[in-house]
Amino acid sequence: MLWGCITDFFTYETTKSVVVKSWSVGIVNRFVQLLIITYFVGWVFIYEKAYQVSDTGIESSVMTKVKGYGYHHNRVMDVADYVFPQQGAAVFCIVTKLILTENQFQGKCAESVKKFSCNTDEDCAKHYGAYLSNGVITGVCLKEGNDSTGQCEIEGWCPAETDTNTTIEPMLDVKNFTIFIKNSIRFPLFNVIRGNFPSTMTSAEIKSCTYHPEKRPFCPIFRVGDVLNFTRQTVEDLANKGGEIGINIEWKCNLDLNIEKCVPRYSFTRLDAPFAKNAVSKGFNFRFAKYFKMENGTEFRTLHKAFAIRFDVMVTGKAGKFDTIPTIINLVAAFTSIGLGTVICDVILLNFLKGAEQYKAKKFEEVSEAQIEASLPQSPETPLSLKTGIKSSYDSGAISLSTFDQPI
C-alpha cells in the first residue's frame, strides 16, 4: 500500500483538448469571456484604477473664519459675540439665540424646575443628590406667602436659571454670514501637497467671490444660507433650536494626470438629521458664563444658554498613481478568470445538451493495456517500459500513465 502511494505521487497528468463545433456552446463561451473582459477593463482598470497604488492616509489642516453682523434681542452681534470657539478650528458654532440669566451669585434660593415642587421639607429630602437640579438640594421647602405649594431650596448660583422663555426671537441674519475655509492637505506616500483654492487667486478675487458648485467651485468663501440650502434646510428650521451641519471636503486625485487636476469637491449634510423630529434632545445648545466682581468683592456672573448651528468641516481623500506590482497582479487575475468560460461550457456540455454521452466519451478517454502495449514497440535495449496496470483519470479529462524501472 505504501509503495502504491509513492508511485501515485510521482505521476504526471496532462489535459486533453476536444474541439466542439457547436454554435450554442461557442456563443456561451465567447459571451462569458466578453463579460469577464468587460468587467476587468471597465470596472477594475478604468473605474477602480486597479493598476495604481493608493494612499488614503491623508494629512489635513483646516482653518475657518466667519464674517457678518446681526441683530439679536435689540443688540448688534459681531463675530466675537456669536462664534465659538474663536480660534477658527474645523469645528465651530454660530450662535443664533441666547437666553440670559443675569446677576447670579453664590447663595441659596428656590429651584426653578417644576419637578422640584414641594409641600413639605420631606418632599425635598427625597431629591438629595439629584443631578438635574440647578444646584445642591438643601432639603428645605420654600413657599411664598400663604401658598400651600412651593419649590425646593438649592445652594449654588442664584437666582436659578429659567430657560423656558419663548419670547426671544432667533438671529435670522445668520443666513447672510460668510464662512472662509482654508484647507491644506498632504498625501505622505507620494509627498503631494495641495490647497483648496488656487495659488493664483488674488486677495481681491477671494474677498469678492462666493462658492457655487458650478460657477465658483474653487471659491473658499461659503454663504451660510447657501450651505443650509444645499442640505435642504432653512435658517428658520435651525435658528430657534440649533443643529449640526457637516461640510465635507473630498480629495480624489489621479496623480498620473496633471497635478493641477487634484482639486477638492464639497458636499454638505445635516449631521443631526436622525434627531430633527425628536421631542427630546432636539437641536444643539450649550452654556457659558461671563464673570465679574463688585467693589465689595462679591462675585457675579451672567449665564448664557446658547442655541447654535454647529459646523463640522471634515476632510477625506484618496490619491492613486501607476505601479507595476498591482498592474501585474490584476492582469494575471484577468487572464486566469477568462478560463471560467471553459468551466461553464463543460458543465453545459456534460449535463444539459444532447449528445452529452458522446462528449464524455471524447473528453474522458479510457485506454486499455493492450492498446498501450501495441502502440509502444518493445526493445531489449530499452531501460524503461510500462508497468502493467493502466490508470484512467476522470479528473480534468486526463489519462495517467505510470512508468517504472524494469530489469533488462
Image (cartoon, rainbow, N blue to C red):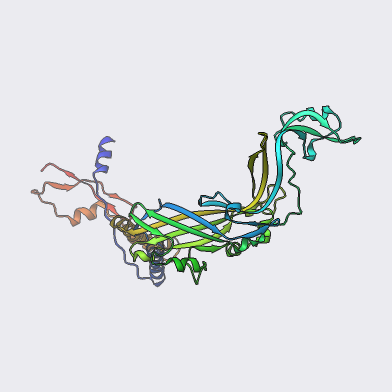
Would residue 402 be visible to someone looking at this image?
A: yes
Task: Residue at 67%, 43% (x, y): give it.
Answer: 303
In x, y percent, where is residue 397? 32, 56
Q: Is residue 28 above or below residue 240?
A: below
Task: Residue at 70%, 51% (x, y): give it.
Answer: 278
Would residue 350 be visible to someone looking at this image?
A: no
Q: Is residue 325 above or below residue 35?
A: above
Q: Quadrant of residue 10?
A: top left
Task: Residue at 55%, 51% (x, y): give it.
Answer: 92
Extreme residue in the left direction: 381
How many numbered circles does the render carry?
Answer: 0
Q: Please state, as top left, top right, bottom left or bottom right, where the C terminus lies in the image.
A: top left
Q: Is residue 36 above or below residue 5?
A: below
Extreme residue in the right direction: 146
Horizontal side of residue 266 vs 122, given as left or right:
left
In x, y percent, where is residue 73? 70, 55
Q: Quadrant of residue 295?
A: top right
* Nearer-the-camera pick, 338 or 268: 268
Horizontal side of residue 368 vs 221, given as left or right:
left
Q: Please state, as top left, top right, bottom left or bottom right, where the N terminus lies in the image.
A: top left
Horizontal side of residue 334 vs 246, given as left or right:
left
In x, y percent, where is residue 171? 67, 58
